[in-house]
């Protein structure tokens, strides 16, 4: 058995936790309530192709009509209800466990609102676009939790929103190769999660208490971590991350993607490659190039 484990570790890259931290939160003025930076934007080079991830609690009016250009968003609804409104006529309500993907591309203009008196609790990830796709077509895709394929195993379940994982394919169709999985474990259960070895990856613990990687780094609710990866690896070769739950109802989100390795300028609601392109985005918005308001 020991020889088999050694052979497996030689043939398949075993991931460890590279860095880890707990999210710090700040209270905000109504209609916003509280915010924390799961991935702080100043570290985007460490997270490439991901730029930032914000955890927000908010009421209606916090994220009214606003523009975006040059990147993608992946919004996971933790609690409450989130109403999506865009200026192309799109409107929908997402509930806990649902995900929305947006490619801002050339010119997105939308609103993200709490429904009625609900407090919406979301995780919004900003995913970079390579330079040649920053002027791509704007599009939105809603992935309802019940439509994401789930695979059960002894002591837990994995729900796949994006990528090919555990023998199923997630419905989220991003413009760059990514994976997104939600893994739920009962106390004492262990799961080995597979990710393409060349993907940069991070995780965020939604609940419970879990150990990650060969070095068994312990993280509890609100814990985040980046993972080691094979920078010169290949998309078709898998790596493994071992996860063990120490409490019941432990749940973690794991995101991964291929680094784009381009310089970017994240500024306000735009992410471009130069400051001049950021200024042009502001000029285009003020000149009406993003279309009418989302309402």
Image (spheres, rainbow, N blue to C red):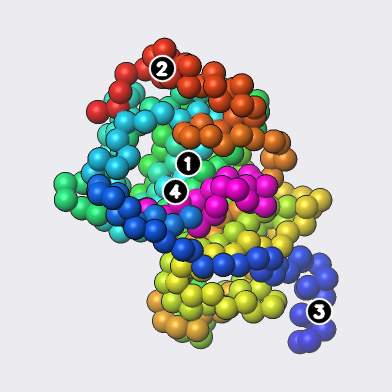
Pointer 2 local density, CA inside 10 Å: few below 14, some 14–19, many at least 20: few
The C terminus lies in quadrant:
top left
Query: Around disc 3, counting alpha carbons within 10 Å, would you say few (fewer than 14), some (14 to 19), or many (20 or more)?
Result: few
- Discs 3/4, front: 4
Residue tagged 4: 124
* Front disc: 3 or 2: 2
- Which of discs 4 and 2 lies nearer the camera? The answer is 2
Residue at mark 2 = 286
Tell me which segment is drawn in magenta: 38-56
Q: Where residue 173 appears, x then y in whole percent?
A: 51, 40
Specify which label sits upstream in the sequence, 4 or 2: 4
Q: Quadrant of the N terminus?
A: bottom right
Q: Earlier in the sequence, mark 3 or mark 2?
A: 3
| Helix, strand or loop status at disc 2 | helix
Q: CA distance from mark 2 to mark 1?
A: 22 Å
Image mark for residue 83: none
* Residue 269, image x, y percentages: 47, 34
Towards the viewer: 226 or 89: 226
Work out how far the residue at label 4 is from the one at label 2, CA to CA, in angstroms: 25 Å
**Lower position in the chain sequence, tag 2 or tag 1:** 1
Location of mark 3 (residue): 6
In whole angstroms, how far apart are the C-alphas of marks 3 and 2? Answer: 60 Å
Give the mark, 3 or 1, whose residue is nearer the N terminus: 3
Q: Is residue 173 left or right of residue 110?
A: right
Whether tag 1 and tag 4 are in contact, CB under 8 A, the answer is yes
Q: Earlier in the sequence, mark 1 or mark 4?
A: 1
Residue lying at 45% horizontally and 37% vertically, measured from the top left: 102
Q: Is residue 159 left or right of residue 80?
A: right
Please tell me which of labels 3 and 4 falls first in the chain: 3
Would you say residue 178 is visible in this rendering? Answer: no
Q: Which residue is mark 1?
A: 73
């Amino acid at each position: 058995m020991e020889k088999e484990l050694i052979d497996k570790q030689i043939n398949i890259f075993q991931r460890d936790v590279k860095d880890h931290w707990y999210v710090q939160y700040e209270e905000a003025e109504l209609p916003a309530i509280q915010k924390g930076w799961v991935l702080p934007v100043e570290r985007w080079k460490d997270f490439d192709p991901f730029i930032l991830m914000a955890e927000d609690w908010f009421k209606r009016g916090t994220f009214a009509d606003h523009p975006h250009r040059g990147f993608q968003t992946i919004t996971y609804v933790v609690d409450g209800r989130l109403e999506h409104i865009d200026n192309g006529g799109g409107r929908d309500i997402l509930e806990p466990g649902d995900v929305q993907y947006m490619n801002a591309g050339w010119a997105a203009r939308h609103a993200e609102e709490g429904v009625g008196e609900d407090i919406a609790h979301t995780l919004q990830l900003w995913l970079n676009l390579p330079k040649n796709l920053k002027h791509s077509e704007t599009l939105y895709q809603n992935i309802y939790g019940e439509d994401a394929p789930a695979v059960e195993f002894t002591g837990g379940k994995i729900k796949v929103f994006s990528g090919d994982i555990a023998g199923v394919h997630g419905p989220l169709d991003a413009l760059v190769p990514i994976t997104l999985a939600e893994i739920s474990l009962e106390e004492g259960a262990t799961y080995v999660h597979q990710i393409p070895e060349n993907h940069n990856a991070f995780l965020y613990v939604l609940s419970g208490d879990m150990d990650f990687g060969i070095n068994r780094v312990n993280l509890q609710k609100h814990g985040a971590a980046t993972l080691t990866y094979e920078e010169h690896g290949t998309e078709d070769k898998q790596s493994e991350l071992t996860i063990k739950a120490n409490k019941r109802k432990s749940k973690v989100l794991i995101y991964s993607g291929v680094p784009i390795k381009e310089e970017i300028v994240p500024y306000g609601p735009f992410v471009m490659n130069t400051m001049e392109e950021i200024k042009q985005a502001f000029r285009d918005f003020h000149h009406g190039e993003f279309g009418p308001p989302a309402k």
